[in-house]
Image (tube, coloured by chain):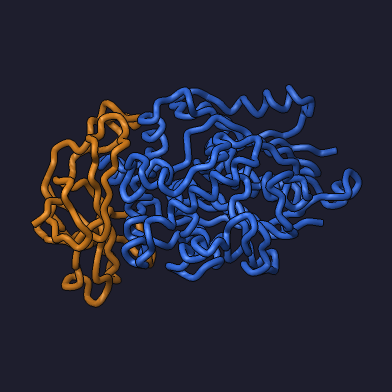
Chain colours: A blue, B orange
């Protein structure tokens, strides 16, 4: 059997100089799959989605029969200020020198969205409330605790109009997925899922250069291509994991992926469309908001959640799902991987 | 010191500049200095959880400058993101650039101090 191991991120976060690529080699040895080929994928917050893309390609191309993808990130050894700086260092030098942070991009975008589309501030808080509620049923979530709208709206300002509860936490975590051919999967199990469409795309590194601050081009492009490859559309989705690093991103991805019209995602959230019992449950795992956001692991964990939903192993958070989507966003939409999976 | 936006022969304008125009791929051969102009705030935020060496709160704005007179029918506007001189700012406010020698402490962040420059322009309400 040909095996490959892909590690997404797998670094001690914020490492400047150390030569860390040996960790996949160590993993392959520790789990007894030598001499399987190993490699590391690094794509900031979308390392996990990039790992799914890479692992899927390795099997689809025939280069590997079975590939193990592991995403991991250790972040909590750094202070919040240092962590914020490490993540902000992906920005263009002209942005970085002004002290921009990813949360500040979210604040700038959220204000524009709320003002332009006349959306109520509460609608963003409702995203946080929903994802905290969903996280209660996820034993792997960092926060298994409900919050209410008032708590979110009264929490400290981080980048106004956004407050503490509009943001995901800093997290240590890991996730893994095994990819193999459909023939091999049928030998092993009766229940499995296939990657039926996957695509990646980028947008400008300089965030203010985008024509429309409320559109993430990487989401739109990767989503359109993933739908096309899967031969489905947004109406066919039963469940979705969206990259809610900030609450506003759930709106932008719903709109970029054609789940909602531009400027109207907040209305669907208000109507309960994305709740567990809604038309399209979004972030049944609790999302990055309550599950946590260990950068390199998050995209893998999104794929893991969709898989669990599709094979009916999601326990108390199970929804009725045959087709699911995961959207993994790197930077502030700088690089995006959208994956569509279907139950078999 | 100038606050240069960069223009290609087809009238596309970006700030900052790029080796090739992101819209059409031509070289950016001209500059448009924004230093003496007034722009309008598109959106803004008070960033309170700032990285090491960055002031707190750090009020930031995306500002739009009208460059329609210099693009031969190309782009009408170019945007820039930067710090604001005051915490009192609203969407639509007119602002003008003010030169600052050091926008953040180069020694405090994760980037090497020599890896880039640290001077630039803040936006001041007119």
- How many marks overall? 0
Give x and y (percent) for residue B69.
Answer: 16, 73
Res B44 visible: yes
Is A237 placed left or right of A250 in the picture? Answer: right
Give x and y (percent) for residue A80.
Answer: 39, 30
Q: Quadrant of the C terminus of chain A?
A: bottom right
Q: Which residue corresponds to the image point at 59% horizontal and 56% vertical from the top-left? A: A275
B2 shown above or below B79: above
Is B6 placed left or right of A253 in the picture? Answer: left
Res B22 visible: no
Give x and y (percent) for residue A223.
Answer: 57, 62
In the image, A116 versus A175, the foreground residue is A116
In the image, A173 versus B16, the foreground residue is A173
Q: Which residue corresponds to the image point at 48% horizontal and 64% vertical from the top-left? A: A265
A254 shown above or below A51: below
A185 shown above or below A258: above
Instruction: Identify the image quadrant of residue A81.
Output: top left
Q: Which residue corresponds to the image point at 50% horizontal and 41% vertical from the top-left? A: A44
Q: Which residue corresponds to the image point at 81% horizontal and 39% vertical from the top-left? A: A2
Residue ranking furthest to the bottom: B73
Residue ranking furthest to the right: A187
A230 shown above or below A128: below
Q: Quadrant of the N terminus of chain A?
A: top right
Instruction: Identify the image quadrant of residue B33.
Output: bottom left
Give x and y (percent) for residue A232.
Answer: 68, 68
């Amino acid at each position: 059997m040909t095996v490959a191991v892909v590690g997404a991120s797998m670094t001690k976060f914020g490492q400047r100089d150390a030569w860390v690529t040996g960790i996949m080699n160590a993993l392959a040895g520790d789990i007894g799959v030598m001499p399987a080929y190993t490699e590391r994928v690094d794509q900031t917050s979308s390392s996990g989605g990039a790992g799914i893309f890479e692992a899927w390609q390795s099997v689809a191309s025939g280069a590997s029969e079975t590939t193990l993808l592991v995403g991991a990130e250790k972040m909590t050894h750094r202070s919040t200020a240092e962590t914020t700086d490490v993540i902000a260092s992906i920005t263009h030098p002209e942005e970085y020198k002004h002290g921009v942070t990813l949360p500040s991009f979210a604040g700038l975008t959220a204000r524009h969205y709320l003002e332009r589309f006349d959306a109520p501030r509460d609608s963003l808080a409702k995203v946080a409330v929903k994802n905290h509620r969903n996280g209660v049923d996820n034993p792997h979530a960092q926060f298994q605790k409900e919050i209410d709208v008032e708590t979110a709206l009264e929490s400290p300002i981080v980048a106004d109009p956004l407050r503490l509860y509009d943001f995901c936490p800093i997290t240590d975590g890991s996730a893994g997925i095994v990819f193999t051919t459909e023939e091999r999967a049928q030998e092993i199990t009766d229940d499995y899922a296939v990657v039926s469409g996957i695509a990646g795309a980028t947008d400008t590194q300089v965030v203010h250069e985008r024509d429309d601050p409320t559109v993430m081009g990487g989401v739109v492009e990767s989503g359109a291509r993933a739908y096309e490859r899967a031969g489905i559309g947004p109406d066919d989705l039963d469940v979705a994991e969206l990259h809610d690093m900030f609450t506003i991103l759930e709106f932008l991805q719903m709109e970029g992926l054609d789940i909602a019209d531009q400027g109207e995602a907040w209305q669907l959230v208000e109507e309960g469309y994305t709740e567990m019992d809604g038309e399209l449950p979004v972030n049944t795992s609790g999302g990055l908001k309550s599950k946590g956001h260990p950068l390199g692991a998050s995209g893998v964990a999104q794929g893991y959640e969709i898989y669990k939903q599709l094979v009916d192993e999601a326990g108390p958070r199970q929804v009725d799902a045959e087709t699911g989507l995961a959207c993994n966003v790197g930077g502030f939409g700088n690089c995006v991987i959208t994956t569509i999976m279907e139950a078999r | 010191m100038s606050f240069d936006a960069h223009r290609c022969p087809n009238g596309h304008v970006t700030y900052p500049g790029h080796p090739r125009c992101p819209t059409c791929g031509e070289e950016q051969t001209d500059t448009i200095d924004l230093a003496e102009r007034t722009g309008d705030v598109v959106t803004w935020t008070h960033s309170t959880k700032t990285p090491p060496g960055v002031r707190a709160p750090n009020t930031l704005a995306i500002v739009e400058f009208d460059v329609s007179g210099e693009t031969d029918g190309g782009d009408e506007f170019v945007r820039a993101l930067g710090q604001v001189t005051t915490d009192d700012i609203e969407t639509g406010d007119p602002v003008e650039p003010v030169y600052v020698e050091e926008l953040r402490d180069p020694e405090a962040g994760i980037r090497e101090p020599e890896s880039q420059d640290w001077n630039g322009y803040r936006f001041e309400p007119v």
